[in-house]
Image: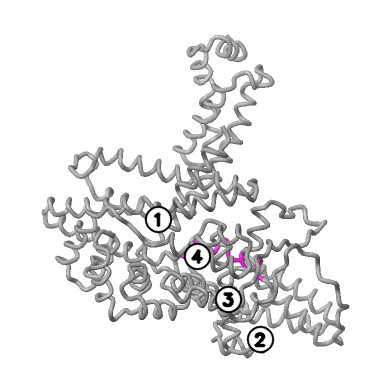
Amino acid sequence: MEDHELLREYADHQSDKAFTELVRRHIDLVYSTALRLVKESHLAKDVAQTVFIGLARKPRSIRNPYALAGWLYRTTRFTAASVLRAETRRRRWETAAMELNDDRSDSQNTWQLLAPRIDEALDTLDAADQDAVALRFFEKKSLREVGAALNVTEDTAQKRVARALEKLRLHFVRQGIAASSALISSALLAHAVHAAPAGLAASVASGSLAGAASSGAAAFTLKLIQVMAATKLKLAVAALIITAAISVSIAVHPKVEPPTLAPAEVVGAVAPKPPRNEIRPAATPRVQASNPNNAHARTSAYDRMSDFIAANHELSREQIEAFLEQNKRSAESLLAAFRVGQDKSYLREAATNFPNSPAVQFAVIANRVFPDDQRRWIDAFKASSPDNAYAWYFSAADYFKTKLVNLAVQDLSEGTRRQTYDSYAVQASQAVDEMYTMAGWPPLAAKAWAPSTAPLTYVTPLKSLANDILQLEQQYRSTGDAASANTMASMGMVLGDQLRAGAPIEQLVGIAMEKKTLAELDPSASYDFLSRPVSEMVAELDRQKKSIAEALRMRDEALPGLSETELANYYERVKLYGEMNALRWLQSKYAQP
């Protein structure tokens, strides 16, 4: 039978035999096409499976059944492209998670993530912020020198640099990369500028001097571009030289003041900062004026909200203080102020005024506000929150750090028995939401932005703890103490499993922890603390990673198309039930069949 006959037989009579024959005939074509595109055999198999599932579901949708091979080829290419996009997102998140479990320096790990995207991110900054970044991180000037170069005070220079770093952080968050402003800062300082090849300075200097001999700044610029092309310099260097040429042109020619233009019309433009303690009325999102020449104008509710957040996410000290005054500087409001302003003085104030608050204790420990008194704060947290596993894990990590291994193992064991894992994020997110709303933000923007201010500092001691567990397990195995090694492996699996109940980034960290633990076990052996063989556990963890990546991909595709009400529902669920539950809700409600 010909392909079209087999296809009709399957469509009319659901003949498994006919469909099996079609797969047998064309599996080589589909698999080989997929392998060329996705490069990896296991992904190619997934693509082939998806293609034939599509054929099985809709055999009558093929316009020309006589050319089934062409349809299979086109469908394979389309499916492979989708798989590659999902795989790229998954690896981006996994890499961000594994950054927390890598033995290399944080700045090196962060730079490997950021380097391919750093110039795109810098393009989102305005000229003033770019100048501050270039002076601080590319030329490695002090904040005082940055201020002098920009003709501003040192304090203003510090704020400008901090603002630029926060904008970069927000940009990377939207790209699926979790990196703090501090990590971005250290990565830029350590890795952004490298020594140029030997002899390049002399070549550039001679070319520049030759260009300078030409008449006029325009000729100077053209000569420099020719020199750059001849020496195959990178675009970044060319841009810097051209900028210098333009500066020369400005210096040579008289300054002409541009005509005063009417400001672009905006909707709900943000009002000036209010006086201290004044409550601003709620404002509507600021929408950038439409550019008729921009084919990618951002018009959806999600894009308008994202643009508003990017432009206005930094609250002033006065706005934060006004929120604190209205809330009588409560523990919750001080913790929110720290999350928004990243100023540890708010945590110190909270620690002084509310030393018995578990949420304050958690934040003080996670952010090492009083490093010399870390043990005292941990013991207080254990006393106030004995059912919270984090109290015992913080304690175990601290004991490992001070080489008190027996005490560390005891507290680690206590932590694995707890059923509560409270990082107090929900309460803090609600307070942050209220702070931004009070500052005049649209409710949707405040609701969406609040969860993203949550720090992941508390994951750092857990990362350290997981590495200590693994090292101790390896030590026990090397001495032949299999029972103790298995006990440590069991506790490492519990720690990873508990993290997998959190947000996607925490889940990926937990999966990485568990896979490292499983890698130390004999895949052919059975273990009492595992519910299934090692190979099946690893496969299940891989499936969970894939599921997380798929949920995030679907979210990225779905959110821009939602209405303002639908977006509000989603972010409300993130706040109340956690991001993973919100993602599942989004999948069930908006995923395509």
Magenta part, dominant SS: helix
From the image, tell me which residue sits under label 4: 453
The crowding category of the residue bearing disc 1, from other C-alpha atoms within 10 Å (few below 14, some 14 to 19, many at least 20), is some
Look at the image and say whether residue 114 sits in the magenta stretch.
yes
Q: Secondary structure at mark 1?
A: helix
Q: Mark 1 to mark 3: distance in Å?
A: 31 Å
Of badges 2 and 1, nearer the viewer stands 1
**Coordinates of residue 415 in the picture (x, y in percent):** 24, 58
User: Is residue 290 found left or right of 272 in the rendered image?
Assistant: right
Q: Are marks 3 and 2 in contact (CB under 8 Å)?
A: no
User: Is residue 584 found left or right of 174 in the rendered image?
Assistant: left
Of 504 and 172, the residue lying toward us: 504
**Coordinates of residue 572 in the picture (x, y in percent):** 52, 52
Of badges 3 and 2, nearer the viewer stands 3
Q: Are marks 4 and 1 in contact (CB under 8 Å)?
A: no
Quarter of the image where the N terminus is located: top right
**Coordinates of residue 435 in the picture (x, y in percent):** 54, 68
**Which of the 4 image quarters holds residue 532?**
top left
From the image, tell me which residue sits under label 1: 506
